[in-house]
Image (cartoon, grey):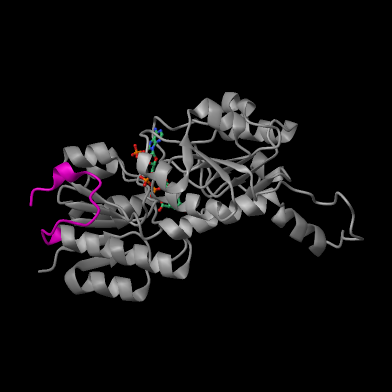
Amino acid sequence: MKPKVYVTRQLPEEVLAIIHQSCDARAWEDIDLPVPRDVLEREITDVEGLYCLLTDQVDKALLERAPRLKVISNMAVGYNNIDVEEATRRGIMVTNTPGVLTETTADLTFALLMATARRLPEASEYLRKGSWQTWSPMLLTGQDVYGATLGIIGMGRIGEALVKRAHGFNMNLLYYNRTRKPEVEEAYDIRYTDMDELLSVSDFVCVLIPYSTETRDLIGAKELRQMKPTAVLINTARGGIVNEEALYEALRVGTIWAAGLDVFDREPVAPDHPLLTLPNLVSLPHIGSASVATRMKMSRLAADQLIDAIYGRRPANLVNPSTWGG
Ligand SMILES: NC(=O)C1=CN([C@@H]2O[C@H](COP(=O)(O)OP(=O)(O)OC[C@H]3O[C@@H](n4cnc5c(N)ncnc54)[C@H](OP(=O)(O)O)[C@@H]3O)[C@@H](O)[C@H]2O)C=CC1
Ligand SMILES: O=CC(=O)O
């Protein structure tokens, strides 16, 4: 008998086929909507593997209903949707999908930075609604990217990939990270600073750290006040790292010049959220890794890790290595 697994969304057909080859798999039928909690609570009771997305909350209450569970395979690099501590306590392996999405997410981060600096969505909207009457000296003017100072909070895989893009724009580079990265400093001529200096001298600040209790509200009213009035804040990491109420106020009164967000505290963000009323906010629906090739790689990697863990092979990206018993 094949081991039972549950998959919380419809995946590309070839990826589901790979899972079906090795496992007795049931999958939530929808492509666009998350599995309802009551369905997940029912489905998890007899499975050895869970293939989930960042939209699924895998918390203590859910894990209590899963006595046979061996592995939770998350199709994302961020795993703040999972109670890893509780999973570890229960000996359940947790895997994620780092690396395969790094370049695509760095592309999106830089694209959002450019779009926000040069007001691209606003300019496009202006033209489409028929407001364009003539070329005008200060019409839709933005901030220069070439030669500006970029401060990166979080010098991990995506942070480093962003540095390579910023180099092409001759940017002056600063970073803040939990641990210093001398090899990155040497390779890319980038300077380590504390948060205070990074915030006060950067023209662009990009947030690229994981969400945790430690990083929640890392950027609040005080930090926004430290930034230049011409500065642009970009968050492609997780909502909640930037306090949304403080950001709204800072953008409204001009404490900072603009912001670009790919992520929100609650997703999907409510269409009537105050932030979305602001012209100096560029907003995207969490599409950092959304290229066809990258989403295929992520879904395949998550499937491989699910199967490896169930069949006693060490998965390539184990978030909680202490659960590996060999
Ligand atoms: N918008 C989107 O679609 C996407 C969003 N993401 C988000 O981006 C995040 C980063 O991904 P990735 O670069 O692959 O992750 P990495 O783990 O490679 O990098 C994270 C970096 O953040 C640093 N860090 C962690 N905690 C803190 C802290 N409290 N203070 C300062 N620095 C800290 C780490 O430091 P250290 O070196 O000491 O560990 C590490 O260098 C993910 O966690 C995810 O939330 C990722 C992909 C797509
Ligand atoms: O947000 C996306 C991820 O992979 O993490």
Judge left or right: residue 83 versus residue 220.
Answer: left
Residue 190 point in image, percent of width and height: 48, 41
Residue 275 point in image, percent of width and height: 65, 41
Question: Measuring 80% from the left and 64% from the top, which residue is drawn there?
Answer: 128
Tell me which segment is drawn in magenta: 310-326
Q: Is residue 173 visible?
A: yes
The N terminus, quarter of image? bottom left
Judge left or right: residue 204 versus residue 103.
Answer: right
> Which image quadrant for residue 64?
top left
Name the residue nearer the viewer: 222 or 128. 222
Q: Quadrant of ligand 1?
A: top left
Q: Pick out the residue farthest to the right.
A: 133
Marks counted in the figure total: 0
Name the residue nearer the viewer: 164 or 246. 164
- Residue 324 painted magenta: yes
Residue 84 point in image, percent of width and height: 27, 41
Judge left or right: residue 33 versus residue 51.
Answer: right
Judge whether 164 appears above or below 26 on screen: above
Residue 141 point in image, percent of width and height: 79, 49
Name the residue nearer the viewer: 27 or 284. 284
Question: Measuring 36% from the left and 66% from the top, which residue is drawn there?
Answer: 297
Question: Measuring 42% from the left and 41% from the top, which residue is drawn there?
Answer: 185
Q: Main secondary structure of the magenta part?
A: loop
Judge whether 21 appears above or below 87 on screen: below
Q: Is residue 285 visible?
A: no
Q: Pick out the residue farthest to the top.
A: 222
Question: Measuring 45% from the left and 32% from the top, which residue is drawn there?
Answer: 216
Q: Pick out the residue farthest to the left.
A: 326
Name the residue nearer the viewer: 57 or 243. 243
